[in-house]
Image: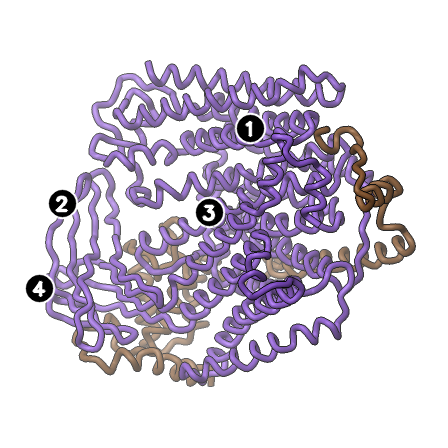
Chain colours: A brown, B purple
Amino acid sequence: MKRIFLACVMGLCCWSGMALADNAVPTDTDPVAQKRAMALAAKLRCLVCQNQSIADSEADLASDLRRQVREQIAAGKTDEQIIKFMTDRYGDFVLYEPPVKATTVLLWIGPLLLLVAGATGMVFLLRGRGKEQEGVPALTPDEQARAEALLEGRTLPFPSGKGRK
Amino acid sequence: MIPEIGQFALILATLLMIVQGTLPLVGASKGISAWMALSRRTAQGAFFFMALAMGCLIYSFIVNDFSVLNVATNSNTKLPLAYRIAASWGSHEGSIMIWVFMLGLWSCAVSIFSKHLPEEMVARVLGVMGLVGTGLLLFLLLTSNPFDRIFPVPIEGRDLNPLLQDPGMVLHPPMLYMGYVGFSVAFAFAVAALLGGRLDATWARWSRPWTTLAWCFLTLGILIGSWWAYYELGWGGWWFWDPVENASLMPWLVGTALMHSLAVTEKRGTFKVWTVLLAICTFSLSLLGTFIVRSGVLTSVHAFATDPRRGMFILALLALVIGGSLVLFAFRAPRVGASGKFKLVSRESALLANNLLLTVACGTVLLGTLYPLFLDALKLGKISVGPPYFEAVFVPLMVPTIFLMGVGAVARWKEATLPDLWTRLRWALVVTVIVSVAIPFILGRTAPTSVALLALGFGMALWVATSAVVGFLDRIKHVGGSFSEKLARQPRSFWGMFVAHLGIAVFIVGVTVVKGFEAERDVKMTPGDTVSVGGYSFRFVGIEDHPGPNYQASRGTFELSKDDKVMRNLYPEKRKYFSFGMPMTEAAIDSGVFGDRYVSLGEPLNDGKQSWSVRVYHKPFVTWIWGGCILMTLGGLLALSDRRYRVNARREAGAVSWTSVKLEKA
């Protein structure tokens, strides 16, 4: 089912291009397979480069791996099988989306933990504030006096250190 | 001779910084005004010597003085002048050098524009900046001296990494560092307030323009970096979630939270403790960002260990700055009483929630960036954390942020009620939902995932825009006069917010459309071939040799046309730098308001027919991504030009009294 949706999307993407005369040779003839290959290549790390996916890199290893991916797609392998092939060969390092396992659990649930902790803290804080501050005057007596002075058109000096003079 | 002058100036700057970082602080706590008064002069003096040192370094690069190790490793005689200048900050030493230079610049600026501040405050702020500067200058002098000489002197230098030979290199690092280092002012204000035990609305008001300015620089710096990566790397992406990019995004996220938190502290006198914490975090992340990029720890944890002196120094410095300020925070912050009250549904709450979300988003980026390093250091295996991870965790955090951004801009201070919010926001909500659901179908999308993503993107953009408009209409309702008078009466700070928020909307539209509609083809082309993408066709005319100053290029000519009408020629290049093995791709881009046509050369196919592998892209609305960032920066600058800051300046001349400013503001 997912594949069919993908095919529809690809079809629409390429449709506008197909309408025009086009005689360049695609590196891949099947647009669906090409899109799959590109999506996979974007998830795989070029191991000899400095943080580039094999889709982006022009290193020899990257183009070798891109060819591998295309060949395996042509051979009818699923995305999962191809990813498994890559990780068996190169380890998890080759994957830009780290697999969920004991050592990466914290990585994956970390953001949620942060959010829950932060939100709890915030609600706690806001609740506490609300109760604590019922009935507390918004202005200190000093501020009150100054506000009144202002309304009457007088000025009161500020406590030292607050204004310049 | 010149490098020695630079070296000497650097030492003098360090000595002055040491004075700036100690005596004024002691003076402020003991009430010795002569010591406090030292802060301004020492800051200006230190800046003078740092500028001199920076000038000497740049001069050494300009005249190709290869007896300086830094010049010999990062430049050569064939390098064009602009890049020789940019090479001054291209190396590790040079980038730390420009970092401290900018710290000098900011503290000098503080010393000049702080005449209205109490002497004690100035002494503390400049003192804290002096301490930070001392740490970095010592790091520079003891472990990464940019003026180190070599003997025998090489006849020719190596080269600046060709990736860096780009106008982006001239602008991006200085802008980014202006942002990073600018947050040191906010940090210094926060620490000074903690030291003085005086955390009030005035403190927030003093610190605000500095923070906004630093944020503008950082936004611009990130924008230039993103644009540079887009056209230079040759594969059409604009953000790669590379650790280096993440290092700049983290202070931006927390800095954005800080800017908003400062606004609340100034206007409502609340969130003080939180604001101080954010100021400390923002600068700490800037520092961390500089170091994780510069220390080489990113390429490999082991690079860090190859020069343990630098590594240990960095760790110690980070521990001192971050740890020290947090300890101070722990001791002093609770003493600063909370004040101001607000209900659970209020603008304060919306802003606080958004602060939280931005902070969590930053924490997430930090986690994803450092996790592989820790795993590797603990020998638990090597993993890669890349775009799929960040997109999966970052986007869900941004959706509620964007929603609350709309609410926060409209909700009343202190107490807002849900029914009232509903009445005011319902049109925005209705328009957003209907239009954003309709757009994907109008654009011919039917696949559910594609429709959902587009609707989400457009929905967020529309929500930000419509709620900003609602907020705007609300504001002008309460002002008298004709429409143009109403507009003229709005303060610049309001326009700043309005423009910056619209910038976010524009940015989201760019991201959404590029993600949803970009098209790319990867083809083999022989001269005469045509390839089309996104309704545009590219005809490969041919390829020719094109010599450059320090490289030899193969330059392709492509004729870009739409509907059989020729628009222009594009000339992508493949450059082979004399000093560097890897060929560099120079993409050619036809850029327009509604998107880019992008072509980059792959490799020659050596089939005797001049065939090349070629990538062509159509990137609709990609320019909106950067346009949005420019609007955000403009918004920040507008807010900075607000009248009350100028009134502040006038007040220095004694023309307006403190109280009347307060009145004007009210």
Kindly identify which chain the residue marked by label 4 belongs to. Answer: B
Q: Are marks 3 and 1 in contact (CB under 8 Å)?
A: no
Front-most of residues B325 and A150 = A150
Q: CA distance from mark 2 to mark 4?
A: 22 Å
| Amino acid marked by disc 4 | Lys
Q: CA distance from mark 3 to mark 4?
A: 41 Å
**Residue A134 percent coordinates (x, y):** 90, 56
| Amino acid marked by disc 2 | Pro
Is circle 3 on the same chain as circle 2? yes
Q: Residues within 10 Å of mark 3 (few under 14, many from 20)?
A: some
The residue at which mark 1 appears reads as: B112
Which SS class for mark 3? helix
**Residue B539 is at least partly visible in this image:** yes
Which mark is on residue B244? 3
The residue at which mark 2 appears reads as: B547
The residue at which mark 4 appears reads as: B609
Q: Are marks 1 and 4 in contact (CB under 8 Å)?
A: no
Kindly identify which chain the residue marked by label 2 belongs to. Answer: B
B411 up-or-down from B450: above or below: above
**Residue B653 percent coordinates (x, y):** 61, 30
Is circle 3 on the same chain as circle 4? yes
Front-most of residues A130 and B379 = A130
Residue depicted at 48% across the width and 57% down the height: B386
Residue depicted at 66% across the width and 31% down the height: B117
Q: CA distance from mark 1 to mark 2?
A: 49 Å
